[in-house]
Amino acid sequence: PVNAIARINTVIYAAGSFTHADGLPVNGIAKLASDGWSQVGSGLSGTVFTLQPLSGCIYVGGDITGVGHYDSTTREWSAPERTVDVFGQAINNLVRWCVDDFAWEAVRMLDDSAIGSPLAMTT
């Protein structure tokens, strides 16, 4: 099922525990733009419970255990099995996808300033 929906500009993001959107494999998160549904990277492992757009990124919270990774050599996305992000940070249930960066990143919670009030992440 879809557990969360958010929007950045004209793109709608839907997330939850689904594996397909309009017949395409999406692994827990998908985006809807003017050209239809598509995957966000190669998706996530686990279940997404909440989405929060902030400063051109979509913050994703839930029971997230892995993310996909883009291999620039093969020009393909891996399955969402990596337990660390592109910077080597552990995936601990909160990640973000920044539209301009084209990569999943772990969110380190040093304080609330990273994403604002934790209440902003409730569903």
Image: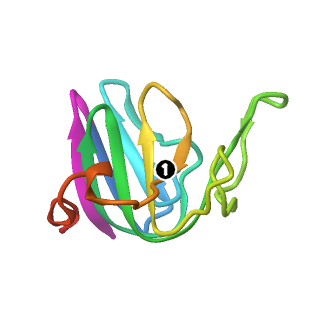
Q: Nearer the viewer, residue 77 or 37?
A: 77
Q: Classify 10 Å Cα crowding around label 1: few (below 14), some (14-19), many (20 and above).
A: few
Q: Position of residue 16 (x, y in %)?
A: 37, 65
State the image quarter where residue 63 is shown: bottom left
User: From the viewer's perspective, is residue 76 above or below residue 30?
Assistant: above
Q: Nearer the viewer, residue 25 or 103?
A: 103
Q: Position of residue 78 (x, y in %)?
A: 72, 48
Q: Residue at x 34, y 44 (%)?
A: 58
The amino acid marked with disc number 1 is Gly
The residue lying furthest to the bottom in this view is: 63
Q: Residue at x 45, y 54 (%)?
A: 107
Q: Nearer the viewer, residue 93 or 12?
A: 93
Magenta-colored segment: predominant secondary structure: strand
- In the picture provided, is 121 more to the left or to the right than 24? left
Q: Does the segment drawn in magenta span residue 3?
A: yes
Which residues, given as a range, are shown in magenta?
A: 1-11
Question: Which quarter of the rendering shows the C terminus?
Answer: bottom left
The residue lying furthest to the right in this view is: 73
Q: Residue at x 37, y 57 (%)?
A: 60
User: From the viewer's perspective, is residue 95 above or below residue 62?
Assistant: above
Q: Which residue is mark 1?
A: 23
- In the picture provided, is 85 more to the left or to the right than 16? right
- In the picture provided, is 77 more to the left or to the right than 48? right
Q: Residue at x 48, y 56 (%)?
A: 20
Question: Which quarter of the rendering shows the N terminus?
Answer: bottom left
Q: Does the segment drawn in magenta span residue 2?
A: yes
